[in-house]
Amino acid sequence: MKRPQQENHVLVTGVAPADAQALLQLSRRIADAGLTMIEARAAVLGSRAWIACFASGSWDSVAKLETALGRLERDEGLAFRLERSAPRALTGDLLPYLVEVVAADRPGALHHLTEFFASRGITIEQLTASRYQATQTGAEMFSAQATIGIPARTHIATLRDDFLEFCDAHNLDAIMDPVKF
C-alpha cells in the first residue's frame, strides 16, 4: 500500500528590476519543480518588482525548487528567498470587510489607519495603498484599499461608528463594507 505524500509548503519572495520578468521566471521554476501554486502576488513598486508565491508539494519538489532558485540567481542575477511555511489555520471567527480610504496626502496617513485597526485586534489581510495626483486639481492624494478580518465577537455598528469618527478626525473619506464574495 502506497502512503500519501506529505504536503510541504513554501513561501518564495523576491525583489527584482521591474523589467526582469521575475514572476514569469519564478512561476516557471515552481511549475518545473512539480509544486502547485496556491497563491501569488506581484506588484511593480517604483523601478522594482515585488513577488510572493505560496506553493506546495512533496519534499523532493521543494528541494528541486531550491536548486532551481540557486541557478536562477547565478545565471539571471535574480534572487529569491524560500521559506518553509504552512497553510494558514482558518478559525472561522474573522468576518471579512473591505475598507476604502481616500484623502489629501499627508505623512502618517497609512500609519494612523493601520494603528486604528491594530488597536482593536483587527487584522489587515490584504492592503494596497498609493499616492497619486488628482487629475482635476493636481492635489496630492492618498488612497488605500484593505481587506480586514474583524473578530466575530466585535459589535459591527460600534466599530463602524468608531471608524467613521476616526475618519472625521483625520479628514479621511472612507467606507467599510462586508466582503460579498
Image (cartoon, helix red, strand yellow):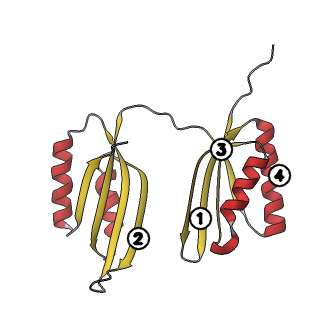
Q: Residues within 10 Å of mark 2 (few under 14, many from 20)?
A: few
Q: Residue furthest top?
A: 1
Figure check: 142 above or below 154: below
Residue 127, horizontal then vertical, whole percent: 42, 58
Helix, strand or loop at label 4? It is helix
Q: Amino acid at mark 4?
A: Thr
Residue shown at the point (52%, 38%) measured from the top left: 88
Q: Residues within 10 Å of mark 4 (few under 14, many from 20)?
A: few
Residue 50 has which mark?
Answer: 1
Whether the residues at callouts 1 and 3 have beta carbons within 8 Å, the answer is no
Helix, strand or loop at label 1? It is strand
N-terminal of the pair, mark 1 or mark 2, is: 1
Residue 63, horizontal then vertical, whole percent: 80, 44
N-terminal of the pair, mark 3 or mark 2, is: 3
N-terminal of the pair, mark 4 or mark 3, is: 3
Q: Residue furthest bottom?
A: 138
C-alpha gap between disc 1 and disc 3? 17 Å
Helix, strand or loop at label 3? It is strand
Q: Which residue is mark 4?
A: 67
Q: Quadrant of the C terminus?
A: top left
N-terminal of the pair, mark 2 or mark 4, is: 4
Q: Which residue is mark 3?
A: 55
Helix, strand or loop at label 2? It is strand
Q: Residues within 10 Å of mark 1 (few under 14, many from 20)?
A: some
Residue 66, horizontal then vertical, whole percent: 78, 50
Q: Which residue is mark 2?
A: 130
Residue 86, horizontal then vertical, whole percent: 60, 38
Q: Quadrant of the N terminus?
A: top right
